[in-house]
Image (cartoon, rainbow, N blue to C red):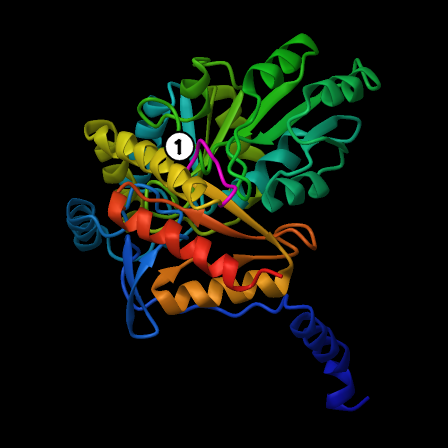
Amino acid sequence: MSAVSKWQRFEEELLALQEQHLYRKIKVIESPQSSHIRYRNRDMLMLASNSYLDLCDEERIKAYAVKALMEYGTGSGGSRLTTGTTVYHTQLEEALARFKERESAMVFNTGFAANSGVIPCLCREGDVIYSDELNHASIIDGCRQSRAETVIYRHNDMADLERKILERQGRQGLIVSDGVFSMDGDIVNLPGLVNLADTYGLLSMIDEAHATGVIGATGRGCEEYFHMEGRIDILMGTLSKALGAEGGYICGSRTLTEYLKNNARSYIFSTSLSPVIMAAAKRALELIEEETWRVRRLQENIRWFCRQLQEHDVDASSDTAIIPIRIGDEEKAMRVSEKLMELGFFIPAIRYPTVRKGEAMLRAALMASHTKEELSAAARAIAESIRCYEG
């Protein structure tokens, strides 16, 4: 077999992606993540970052990270259960547990590693996992890796979920859902989900990657938003979004975290995150608690931006920092995004397989540091760019 033929099918698939306007290219940012970035040698307004509280480039966090760097160096040197746990790792986990009002917390290398490690660890053959149809890919992969039966219920549809539970009543299992859905930006029906979990003796697990630092009066996430503190069995989240650092975490009972430390493969067999990153996340969490204005400002920006879009006849609304602007056609979404880039607004198009085919969108993501003037200008530019490619 020649070298050419070995790669032919892959090259053909890449060509097909280009023809369908689904080919992906990396965008190289030339500055820190903040409300303004440099891209292609230009200053642009960033409207796509998950750094919702604009903490990636915060001076006090960087100074604290430098302190950790000088004390502990760059790497951890091993897995958490061998040589990879430092004082900063344990201090961060203690701070996360306090913030989420839980007995214990543990840090994973990424949010993806947390979901894909925890779900198969807790669910075994004979169990049932009930998963929302719009859950994140990391949850989907965690379900696939488990030997449990996975049952997909209609998005946020508690009646459909209960019907499916009743069909399998008496079996142990887990209900798992995004807290804030990463593409549509809507919020889980937490009262309904927890009620069903408690009624039928199932564990409840919520992925709060896009909820922590964003919803709730002080940014503590879904439980605070719904005034249901302490009701979720397994809280998962990330350090890489509102906290501006890197990593994932699980909060819950001490029984939960001790079990995961002894059984979760993505935790046991991964080299630990750098103490520098742990220090940065710890300081960011402190600032979220100390400076609650950041969360309030973000929530004000969300309301303002949605109103501005609606005033320009763009059908968009959200209660979270993720505002989907639906385009539909993949080619049109790419053209609108490119037009906005030309105008100085960084908003990439989101296409299949992240969303369904024919449901391409712009996914605007706001920061607490955006000004009302910037958001008004962005809303106007979005509306004008969409109109350019109508018809």
Q: Residue at x 60, y 30 (%)?
A: 177
Whether residue 268 is visible to the viewer of this picture, yes or no, is no
**Image location of residue 132, percent across then percent down:** 66, 32
Q: Main secondary structure of the magenta part?
A: loop
**Residue 376 painted magenta:** no
User: Residue 172 falls in which quadrant of the image?
Assistant: top right
Q: Residue at x 69, y 68 (%)?
A: 20
Q: Is residue 11 above or below residue 200?
A: below
- Front-most of residues 255 and 218: 218
Query: Within 10 Å of the Cα at label 1, are there few (<14), some (14-19), or many (20+) other Cα atoms?
Result: many
**Image location of residue 267, percent across then percent down:** 51, 42
Q: Residue at x 17, y 54 (%)?
A: 70
Please provide the residue range marked out in magenta.
Answer: 314-321
Q: Residue furthest top?
A: 199
Q: Is residue 93 above or below residue 27?
A: above
User: Residue 89 falls in which quadrant of the image?
Assistant: top left
**Residue 318 painted magenta:** yes
Judge from the rendering whether residue 190 lies leftward or rightward of residue 18; answer left or right.
Answer: left
Question: In what quadrant of the picture does the C terminus appear?
Answer: bottom right
Residue to which mark 1 is pinned: 212
Judge from the rendering whether residue 222 lies leftward or rightward of residue 216; answer left or right.
Answer: right
**Image location of residue 12, percent across then percent down:** 74, 78
Question: In what quadrant of the picture does the N terminus appear?
Answer: bottom right
At mark 1, the secondary structure is: loop
